[in-house]
Image (cartoon, rainbow, N blue to C red):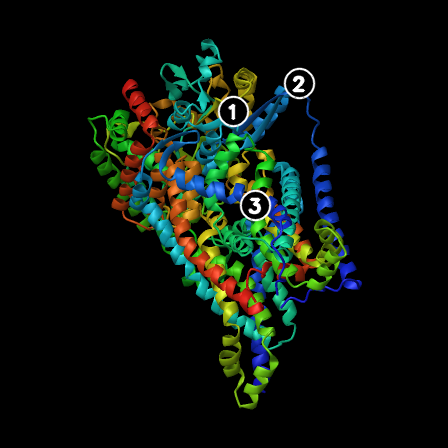
């Protein structure tokens, strides 16, 4: 009997927790589906009438499609570049033997924890000097660099668990390292790479500070920087802002729904075992 | 804790390859959708003159963004080789956003700032050029209040509209509180008495928003001015040019913040003033959740449409201060347009701005938004609407000063804004609020030396 | 497990791209920011001013307030750790549907703080959803101006941070708890230990290392990656009472164009952060040793 009651209590607690976790997201969606008048009348109720006009308005009021494209491009390029660079480095750390091997790995671990804001002022001046400010490559370059420490750390941890004898055998057979990396290690690493790509893509998608500072042209912004800057402009049009917020989250939600395990594994990997 | 499949062959690996493929496809699809969304926008002329225009005004004049949009398409229809990209700005990032862009000498070709110092400062910092170098004097002579942006004999920016800042009240709510709905509070004791009556009837007397610091800054603009005898007092206090001292200025500020703290303590201001932006706070008036507000002509007209013009009373803000300027009103061009120093086509930008002042375009501004164009060619006889007439009469009756225009933008954003927030959010005393001003002014003098020198020159020259 | 092989040349070629990227993204900017901290002026027009920026920093109440707020927000770390641990223990007792619960509570962690901040700014305003709900349920005395008053704003931002980070802690702890050998629990049970005794005396000590890791990772996050919350929720207001170091750096470096002052603030932040980074490095090194 007591056991039963405690199980009920646990369920109640967890359901409450889920409500708290999901409510802000639900609030975004339900507000996005309201008209302005409906929201003003009652911010908490369900949408009545149900309206999609705010979603359409987002594309008229802001260059939302362009922002989405920018974010996708930036994520694609910086994540791809960081993955390739980090895979090479991690392969060297896991299977090579060179002076400074541990130092290199420790360096990456330390840089993982470095406050990004420390870099924004000097990188801004560099981008101004080389004329990349207000261009997508400026953030692509910086994001690539910022993603590398975690990616090296993450991939090294994984590669070190691969059976070394496979690599050894290949080396003895006379295969070159680029060949081993491509033909043997890469196929074994797909799941891990997928996880890494997911985690890094989310980081890039969500980044605000650099995007805000580096991208000054309205059409050239990422989704997050665009939304943050339009917040004040449309502060009295809650459904519009919430529709924008929902659209900015949607790709992540979809990704999360079909690759939840990768998320969990990747995002918790900074925590040692 | 990781259960990665590391077998060299097998189903799971293929599964991952599949997922990887799906992810790449998904990202590609996203990019494709976005591209498709883009291609629905009108094709752009290949060798067009591109002008990026960071525009602000909607907060003063609801509807002005739409007017500007219409103007741009009208202009582009005639000047196919010019392509103007208007980017609406928000009040809370107007100064900071432009300052950030100026550091890299990039950003808009035309920018909007608030009049006088927020406009003159970028000019002094070589981020803006004087518009009078690109526009004939005969044209500038037609602009109203162009002198708000005069420095060293040049006119830096172009005004578009003039707005006054009246007090508005809801006549129905006044009636409900047993007040005469047609009697404006003229003196401060009238005002406090009205507030008390409203409050006693469960009506929020004043509805404003200050999460962005704007309401506090407005109180400074309206009420600190009422304590001054002349603008020179403010200029010499900030510029340290002798005469009126910073200590004396501090004394006036303390008095003003004590008055604001009193309004808050008595519950005369909406309780959520600190979590609403100015624009959000203003919604309380048309929603009939507050009986009074300080607002712009443009908003009064827009609310007149929502509530009915006969439901709204307008008057000059009640008089609180005892300085010689207490009897002035609060009309300003508010915001103005200038050309940036890095703009590639300065003349083309100037041509577009001047074109906005063509009589039919200014007339369109009035008919679409109710805003009074800052142009002498605009026939005031076309103001026929009752409420608009009242506002126009207020705007033109006496001398006007908007005091916020006369403090350096850094002092505005780092002192005026937080000091008002401190008082209105009940987080500090008037003395603490004044200490912020004192510290920021001294820091500005020390850290922005070129700006400070220019300010002194300007303060001296214009006195 | 490293094979004994002679030192090789190829690994250098393999790490070269990473080294170049790290030099460009981290090494140069860090050197530059230290240099800038002794200069005043704007990009391309800098004057050497010695330690004036640092002196100015420690006389600037806004900066001191920003540091203080970062320190206050560090208090969210123990709170979220304890909460996450308790919930993880509940989930670990294999309650029905625990996997689904885990998936749901993890969701906030992946969401962009920008969008979440927008949502919370409406939920938490003076007459926003939260206060409306409180008032409608007869507990209106609990309603307050969550973001608009100096007394509440930092705890409110802290709560939003906890809301978003909690799921991360839960997932990490559940994973660690699942890895605790069942024999340990069984042995304790045979010795007559009851449910909560097992939890506290067997399970929690067993995942101590994970807890330490979580605490340090979150401390680093709260110290150095909460700009978005402050920017979207309050822009440092009211009256700069919710500014944090990152926001101070952004405001001074960009909106006020005081690169020197911002760089000096960066150096102070780096000094503080290096304490946590040092601990983090030690924990990682230990994790590697344990894994071998």
According to the picture, the residue beneath numbered tag 3 turns out to be: C19
According to the picture, the residue beneath numbered tag 1 turns out to be: B110
Q: Alpha carbon of mark 1 to alpha carbon of mark 3: how far?
A: 42 Å
Residue C182 position in % (x across, y down): 61, 80
Q: Is residue A132 left or right of residue C55?
A: right
According to the picture, the residue beneath numbered tag 2 turns out to be: B80
Q: Is residue B116 above or below residue A142?
A: above
Q: Looking at this view, is B42 or C72 the one in front?
A: C72
Residue C233 position in % (x across, y down): 47, 49
Q: Classify mark 2: helix, strand or loop.
A: loop
Answer with the quarter of the image where residue A217 lies.
top right
The nearer-to-camera label among 1 and 3 is 3
Which quadrant is the N terminus of chain C positioned in? bottom right
Q: Residues within 10 Å of mark 1 (few under 14, many from 20)?
A: many
Answer with the quarter of the image where residue B80 lies.
top right
Q: Is residue C50 above or below residue A17?
A: above
């Amino acid at each position: 009997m007591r056991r039963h009651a405690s199980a009920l209590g646990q369920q109640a607690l967890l359901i409450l927790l889920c409500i708290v976790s999901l409510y802000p997201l639900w609030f975004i969606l339900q507000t996005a589906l309201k008209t302005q008048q409906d929201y003003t009348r009652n911010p908490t109720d369900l949408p009545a009438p149900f309206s999609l006009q705010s979603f359409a308005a987002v594309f008229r009021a802001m260059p939302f499609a362009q922002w989405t494209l920018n974010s996708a491009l930036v994520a694609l390029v910086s994540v791809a570049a960081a993955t390739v660079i980090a895979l090479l480095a991690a392969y060297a750390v896991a299977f090579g033997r060179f002076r400074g091997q541990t130092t290199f790995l420790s360096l990456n671990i330390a840089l993982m924890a470095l406050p990004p804001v420390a870099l924004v002022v000097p990188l801004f001046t560099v981008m101004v000097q080389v004329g990349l400010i207000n261009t997508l490559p400026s953030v692509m370059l910086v994001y690539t660099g910022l993603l590398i420490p975690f990616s090296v750390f993450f991939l090294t941890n994984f590669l070190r668990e691969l059976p070394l004898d496979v690599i050894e055998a290949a080396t003895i057979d006379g295969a070159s390292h680029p060949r081993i990396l491509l033909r043997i290690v890469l196929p074994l690493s797909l799941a891990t790479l997928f996880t890494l790509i997911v985690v890094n893509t989310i980081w890039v998608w969500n980044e605000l500070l650099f995007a805000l500072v580096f991208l000054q042209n309205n059409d050239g912004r990422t989704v997050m920087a665009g939304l943050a800057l339009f917040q004040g402009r449309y502060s009295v049009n809650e459904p519009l802002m919430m529709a924008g917020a929902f659209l900015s989250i949607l790709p992540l939600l979809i990704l999360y729904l079909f690759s939840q395990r990768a998320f969990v594994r990747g995002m918790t990997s900074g925590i040692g075992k | 804790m990781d259960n990665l499949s590391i077998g060299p062959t097998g189903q799971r690996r293929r599964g991952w390859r599949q997922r990887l493929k799906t992810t790449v496809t998904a990202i590609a699809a996203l990019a494709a959708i976005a591209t498709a969304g883009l291609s629905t926008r009108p094709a752009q002329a290949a060798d067009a003159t591109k002008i990026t225009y960071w525009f602000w005004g909607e907060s003063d004049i609801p509807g002005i963004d739409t007017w500007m949009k219409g103007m741009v398409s009208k202009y582009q229809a005639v000047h196919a080789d010019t392509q103007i990209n208007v980017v609406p700005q928000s009040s809370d990032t107007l100064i900071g956003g432009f300052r950030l862009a100026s550091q890299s000498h990039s950003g808009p070709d035309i920018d909007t700032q608030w009049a006088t110092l927020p406009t003159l400062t970028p000019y002094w910092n070589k981020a803006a050029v004087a518009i009078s170098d690109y526009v004939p004097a005969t044209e500038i002579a037609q602009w109203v209040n162009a002198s708000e942006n005069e420095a060293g004999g040049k006119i830096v920016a172009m005004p578009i509209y003039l707005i006054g800042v009246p007090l508005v009240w809801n006549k129905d709510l006044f009636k409900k509180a047993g007040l005469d709905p047609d009697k404006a509070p003229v003196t401060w004791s009238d005002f406090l008495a009205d507030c008390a009556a409203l409050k006693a009837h469960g009506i929020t007397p004043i509805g404003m928003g200050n999460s962005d610091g704007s309401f506090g800054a407005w109180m400074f603009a309206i009420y600190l001015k009422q304590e001054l005898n002349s603008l020179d007092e403010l200029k010499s206090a900030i510029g340290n040019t002798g005469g009126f001292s910073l200590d004396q200025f501090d004394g006036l500020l303390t008095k003003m913040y004590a008055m604001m703290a009193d309004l808050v303590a008595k519950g005369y201001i909406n309780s959520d003033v600190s979590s609403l932006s100015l624009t959000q706070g203003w919604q309380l008036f048309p929603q009939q959740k507050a009986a009074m507000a300080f607002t712009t002509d443009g908003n009064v007209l827009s609310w007149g449409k929502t509530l009915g013009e006969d439901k709204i009373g307008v008057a000059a803000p009640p008089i609180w201060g005892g300085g010689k300027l207490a009897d002035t009103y609060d009309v300003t061009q508010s915001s103005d347009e200038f050309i940036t120093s890095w703009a590639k086509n300065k003349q083309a930008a100037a041509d577009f701005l001047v074109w906005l002042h063509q009589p039919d375009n200014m007339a369109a501004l009035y008919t679409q938004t109710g805003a009074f164009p800052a142009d002498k060619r605009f026939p005031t006889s076309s103001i026929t609407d009752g409420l608009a007439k009242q506002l126009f009469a207020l705007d033109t009756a006496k001398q006007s000063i908007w005091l916020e225009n006369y403090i350096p933008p850094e002092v505005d954003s780092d002192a005026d804004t937080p000091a008002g927030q401190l008082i209105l959010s009940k987080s500090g005393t008037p003395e603490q609020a004044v200490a912020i001003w004192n510290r920021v002014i001294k820091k500005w003098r020390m850290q922005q030396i070129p700006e400070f020198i220019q300010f002194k020159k300007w303060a001296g020259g214009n006195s | 497990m490293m094979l004994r092989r002679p030192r090789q040349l190829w690994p250098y070629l393999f790490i070269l791209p990473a080294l170049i990227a790290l030099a460009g993204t981290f090494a140069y900017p860090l050197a530059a920011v230290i240099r800038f901290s002794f200069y005043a002026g704007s990009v391309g027009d800098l004057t050497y001013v010695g330690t004036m920026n640092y002196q100015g920093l420690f006389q600037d109440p806004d900066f001191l307030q920003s540091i203080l707020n970062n320190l206050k927000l560090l208090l969210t770390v123990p709170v979220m750790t304890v909460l996450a641990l308790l919930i993880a223990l509940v989930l670990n007792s294999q309650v029905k549907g625990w996997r689904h619960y885990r998936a749901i509570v993890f969701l906030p962690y992946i969401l962009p703080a920008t969008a979440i901040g927008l949502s919370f700014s409406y939920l938490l305003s003076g007459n926003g959803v939260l206060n409306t709900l409180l008032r409608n349920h007869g507990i209106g005395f609990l309603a307050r101006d969550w973001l608009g008053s100096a007394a509440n704003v930092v705890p409110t931002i802290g709560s939003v941070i906890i809301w978003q980070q909690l799921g991360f802690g839960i997932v990490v702890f559940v994973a660690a708890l699942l890895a605790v050998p069942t024999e340990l629990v069984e042995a304790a049970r045979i010795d007559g230990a009851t449910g909560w005794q097992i939890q506290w005396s067997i399970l929690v000590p067993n995942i101590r290392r994970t807890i330490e890791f979580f605490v340090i990772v979150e401390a680093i996050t709260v110290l150095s990656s909460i700009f978005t919350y402050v920017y979207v929720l309050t822009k440092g207001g009211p009256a700069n009472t919710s500014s944090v170091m990152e926001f101070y750096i952004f405001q001074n470096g960009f909106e006020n164009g005081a690169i020197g002052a911002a760089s000096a603030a960066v150096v102070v932040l780096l000094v503080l952060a290096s304490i946590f980074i040092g601990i983090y490095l030690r924990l990682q090194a230990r994790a590697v040793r344990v894994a071998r």
